[in-house]
Image (cartoon, helix red, strand yellow):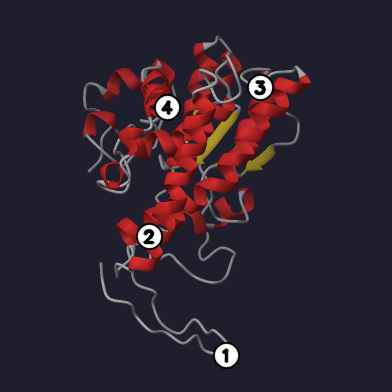
Amino acid sequence: MSEAINYTPPKIWVWNKPNGGDFAAINRPTAGSTHEKDLPVGKHSLQLYSLATPNGQKVTIFLEELLELGHKGAEYDAWLIRIGQGDQFGSGFVKVNPNSKIPALIDRSAKDPIRVFESGAILTYLAEKFAALLPTDPAKRAETLSWLFWQMGSAPYLGGGFGHFYAYAPTKIEYAIDRFAMEAKRQYDVLDRRLAETPYLAGDEYSIADIAVWSWYGNVALGRFYGDAAEFLSLDEYANVQRWVKAIADRPAVKRGRMVNSLFGEPSEQLLERHDASDFDRLTQNQFHVP
């Protein structure tokens, strides 16, 4: 850890220098598009524009789960958005998501296309559209949505907080890492205590809450994000979380979904774009990986 750095904030903050770090080139204090670029459109009603970050994986995993359940209408085209190159600031993407964050979805099955942005909103929209993985019983539905919104509110502390300062910040700041490591462990303890009571977060049934939370907390526990963060946080001590993480990781739809729009890991796990179920077969033949 570095020594404490004394910094006195100015009276009025002004963006007058790069902030450093891995994402400095795309960070800015303004919204809107930076260039004109239309989004591609494929053959299916559902058009997804995304990247296999935890938020992106939520949607592709759920779409693959829907297909696994036999919902043919859940067939989709998944287009790669390279956020490191600023694709999310193209005019076409900004029209779908004015917040310029992945994932973004367009449903073209209706007379007028419907845009949906924010991963939690997309999961809820699709769950209601296909009547799947979101209980209709009021109590069970409330429990599911409570854990879904828990993830939406909590994960920024795991990712933008702990993950950023531990893995990406150009300077290791002891206070920031300690503060967010403490919060990350508190959140894993929340999950571990809940999963000691039930097999899944909302109860006995797998739901969109599990998909949303696993995509963040499961991937970190499996060592797929933030380097050696799982070891640093001693995540193996959360036995109930580990049981749940491994059970979900073994689901065929989860294995497929986390590959879609992926630029991470082994080439055999990177399906840059997905337009048909057979694309996964071609992936195993190394026909889809682009360095």
Q: Quadrant of residue 125?
A: top right
Residue hosting label 3? 134
The residue sitting at 45% across, 67% down in the picture is: 27
Q: Amino acid at mark 1?
A: Lys
In the image, farthest residue toward the bottom: 11
Residue 257 numbered mark, or none: 4
Of marks 1 and 2, the one in the foreground: 2
Q: Answer yes or no: is residue 221 visible.
A: yes
SS at circle 3: loop
Q: From this view, report whether residue 251 is shown above or below residue 3.
A: above
> Reading the chain from its start, which is encountered first: label 2 or label 4?
2
> Reading the chain from its start, which is encountered first: label 2 or label 3?
3
Q: Amino acid at mark 2?
A: Asp
> Reading the chain from its start, which is encountered first: label 1 or label 4?
1
Q: In 3D space, how far apart are the residues under numbered discs 2 and 4 (Cα atoms)?
A: 33 Å
> Reading the chain from its start, which is encountered first: label 1 or label 2?
1
Q: Quadrant of the N terminus?
A: bottom left
Q: Position of residue 149 (x, y in %)?
A: 63, 40
> Reading the chain from its start, which is encountered first: label 1 or label 3?
1
> Reading the chain from its start, which is encountered first: label 3 or label 4?
3
Q: From this view, report whether residue 285 is shown above or below residue 181.
A: above
SS at circle 4: helix
In the image, farthest residue toward the top: 70
Q: Amino acid at mark 3?
A: Leu
Residue hosting label 2? 178
Of marks 3 and 4, the one in the foreground: 3
10 Å neighbourhood of mark 1: few (<14), some, or many (≥20)? Answer: few
Of the pair 119 and 221, the residue shown nearer to us: 221
Q: Quadrant of the C terminus?
A: top left
Residue 11 numbered mark, or none: 1
SS at circle 2: helix
Q: Position of residue 112 (x, y in %)?
A: 75, 36
